[in-house]
Image (cartoon, grey):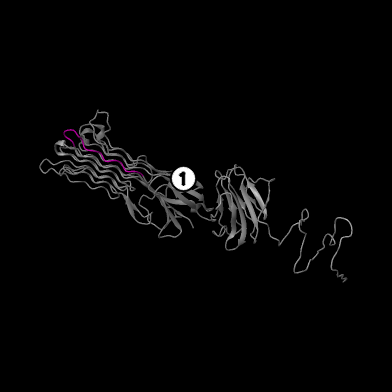
Amino acid sequence: MSKIEVDAITQQSGSTLTVGGGASKTVVADATTVTLGRCGGTVALASGATQSGFGRTGTVDWQTGSIKTATFTAANGEGYFCNTAGGTFEVDLPAGSAGAIVSVQDYNNTFNTNALTIDPNGSEKINGGVAGGELTLNTKGQGVTFVYIDATVGWRTVAGSDDPFADVASNFVVATVSGTGNTLVTAPCCANTKIATFTGPGSLCVSSISPTPANNEVSYLVVAGGGGGASGSNQPNSYGSGGAGAGGYREAKSPAATGYTASPLDGYATPGNRVSLTVASIPIQVGGGGTALAYNAPGSGAPVASQNGSNSIFSSITAAGGGGGGTGCGGASPDNKGRAGGAGGGAGGKSPCGGGAAGAGNTPSTTPSQGFPGGTGTCSANTSAGGGGGAGAVGGNGSTPPNVGGPGGAGVASSISSASVTRAGGGGGGSGYPNTPPRNGTPAPGGAGGGGLGNGSSPSSGGGAGTDNTGGGGGGGGSTFNNANAKTGGNGGSGIVIIRYKFQ
């Protein structure tokens, strides 16, 4: 083998010095320090040549000539403009190696409408998240650069148009809640489950979902506002007034979010009751309780009957407000009738004589039933009213003697919030007054689950309010001897929405 040793090679003429034998030949520069170029000069790779071992400067070559509109596999060192106007798709990252770099950018501000999914290679991670977990980009105008570090963190997001950006890839739902007083906590019993509780209006903001559809199904409890209990008459011959129905009760327990005991009204077996999350901001409506209006004589133009509660809504699930109670005004007045609702309001005293009836429950109809009817009043002197229906039982009928309003129908218990809580009890009916002193009627109990206490006769106070965030119905007002001071009914309790989902 020939060998030539020199201290320097000096170019004698021309502008190019070629070292090496051309194609299929290798030139080795073997030294502790190798210097290429000179100050102010340029070191460049020939057209079509590649490099290895030098790493990158932290930038990518943007592929402006190929706007991406469908799923593709990214290459190390390249950046892509992704147009999701035609629908969602995914970017499959290349196999990770230390220093590998890929960038993506929303092409024309459509990620918020159709998200872009980033899928790592095999079981590699993104931002130290779940092995093989995908990352969803759903912010308008979003752009992110990924650099592969190691097996512990995997691909790290180092720059983005919405910095700081540290979302971890997940095979499960990632969400936050908005609205005053609403909360999101990890279930005490189950470290893989989150519980979102809404006691007022807000949103469940879902930023990522699972590639496994079953993991996107949630458990939920939706309870509407309870109805308002009716007030006693301010006319002669007044009677006890009806307790209000509880707010409608809807529940479904998903197999993905277990670890608790649902109520007997678990409707998961009915496919129309199942809710699967998507990447979106889902508005939550929590129904308020109905108002118990003061009694005014028919024909006065003023409202007579108490009001129904308001609906609660989560996604496709609506729970109907509880029915208001019927007024104890006697005769054939339509205000004697209990109102239909999630659970029905109780009829006022003397209502059977005038054709009045208890309010129907489960209106509109759901499967399982969201609530039961109210009870009826009695038809005799000094009559008492029916109790409001509950989620688990019919409101009780008024009785005479001893002139006691019907108890509110019982609610049902669920531990979706990790503690067993009974909700959606009906309000107790108002009692009539006895003919003999001291003429104090017996208050009728509200149904278990927040139902308000039905009012007795003079000198007791008005009907009790339903408990807030249980959907309890308001208690009915009682009559008073000689009707000197008609008693008001109780307002209904507000509803609640609870969502439980698997997050890891």
Task: Indicate whether residue 229 is drawn in magenta.
Answer: yes
Residue 190 screen position, x and y as percent: 43, 60
Residue 50 screen position, x and y as percent: 74, 57
- Note whether 405 is above or below 123 in the view shown: above
Q: Write down the region rendered in magenta.
A: 224-238
Q: Residue placed farthest to the left in the image?
A: 436
Q: Is residue 44 visible?
A: no
Residue 187 screen position, x and y as percent: 41, 57
Q: State left or right for residue 63 relative to residue 238.
A: right
> Toward which corner of the image does residue 399 lie, by quadrant?
top left
Circle 1 crowding by C-alpha within 10 Å: few under 14, some 14–19, many from 20? some
Q: State left or right for residue 255 relative to residue 462.
A: right
Query: Across the whole image, how many numbered discs are drawn on residues?
Result: 1
Helix, strand or loop for disc 1: strand
Task: Indicate whether residue 386 is drawn in magenta.
Answer: no
The three-letter code of the residue at mark 1 reads: Ile
Residue holding disc 1: 282
Identify which residue, 391 or 467, lies in the foreground.
Answer: 467
Q: State left or right for residue 362 relative to residue 440.
A: right
Q: State left or right for residue 17 relative to residue 321.
A: right
Q: Quadrant of the N terminus?
A: bottom right
> Toward which corner of the image does residue 353 lie, by quadrant?
top left
Q: Residue placed farthest to the right in the image?
A: 13
Q: Is residue 484 visible?
A: yes
Tell me what residue is drawn at x 86 percent, y 62 percent. 10
Residue 122 screen position, x and y as percent: 60, 59
Identify which residue, 18 or 415, lies in the foreground.
Answer: 18
Tell me what residue is drawn at x 22 percent, y 41 percent. 477
- Note whether 311 is above or below 159 in the view shown: above
- Note whether 364 is above or below 25 in the view shown: above
Q: Residue placed farthest to the front in the image?
A: 39
Please name the predominant secondary structure of the magenta segment in the image.
Answer: loop
